[in-house]
Amino acid sequence: MRTIPSLFFTILLAVLLSSCSNTAQPGATLPAESMKGYELYSWLEGDQWKFSLLIGTNREKTLDEIQSTDAALEGLDALRSALEGVSVGQTITWSAKEPLAFPPEEIVQQVAQICRDQGLICNIAR
């Protein structure tokens, strides 16, 4: 009779431990809320605009962090999809220090509209 409780405990422990995994997978989604909002970056690679939406912090991100394959979003549709996962009322601060850049004004306005449609506060730091 002790086998059933032991088996139950083992299964429960395995489930709990598997849910505690903290390793980020490529393309992993961001948490819906961040205490310091989110940081948005953009750059042109070939003829494709890429974006990176990172959790806001008090420190400056490195170019490697910003452009990592885990963070890079290819095109406006990928950015829209990421922004749809952010909770209403969150702040998105968009900056583009060298060698990063802002896309043409038409794309900037589209991103601003996506943020408004999602109930996000978009601050563009030019």
Image (cartoon, grey):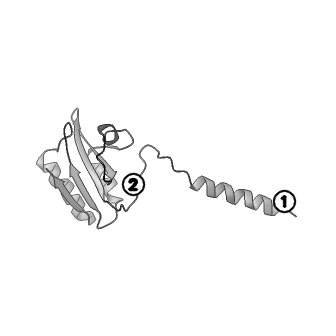
Which residue lies at the image location 79% right of the left edge and 59% below the top edge? 6
In three-dimensional space, the C-alpha distance between marks 2 and 1, rounded to whole angstroms, equals: 41 Å
Residue 71 image offset from top left, x and y in percent:
36, 44
Which residue lies at the image location 47% right of the left edge and 46% below the top edge? 24
Position of residue 105 in the picture relative to residue 88 (left or right): left
Give amino acid for label 1: Thr
Which residue lies at the image location 26% right of the left edge and 61% below the top edge? 91
Q: Residue furthest top?
A: 46
| Corner quadrant of residue 8 | bottom right
The quadrant the N terminus occupies is bottom right
The residue that mark 1 highlights is 3
Give the total of numbered labels.
Answer: 2
The mark nearer the N terminus, 2 or 1, is 1
Q: Residues within 10 Å of mark 2 (few under 14, many from 20)?
A: some
Q: Residues within 10 Å of mark 1 (few under 14, many from 20)?
A: few
The residue that mark 2 highlights is 30
State the SS at label 2: loop
Residue 76 image offset from top left, x and y in percent:
25, 48
Give amino acid for label 2: Leu
Q: Which mark is residue 124?
A: none
Closest to the observer, 78 or 89: 89
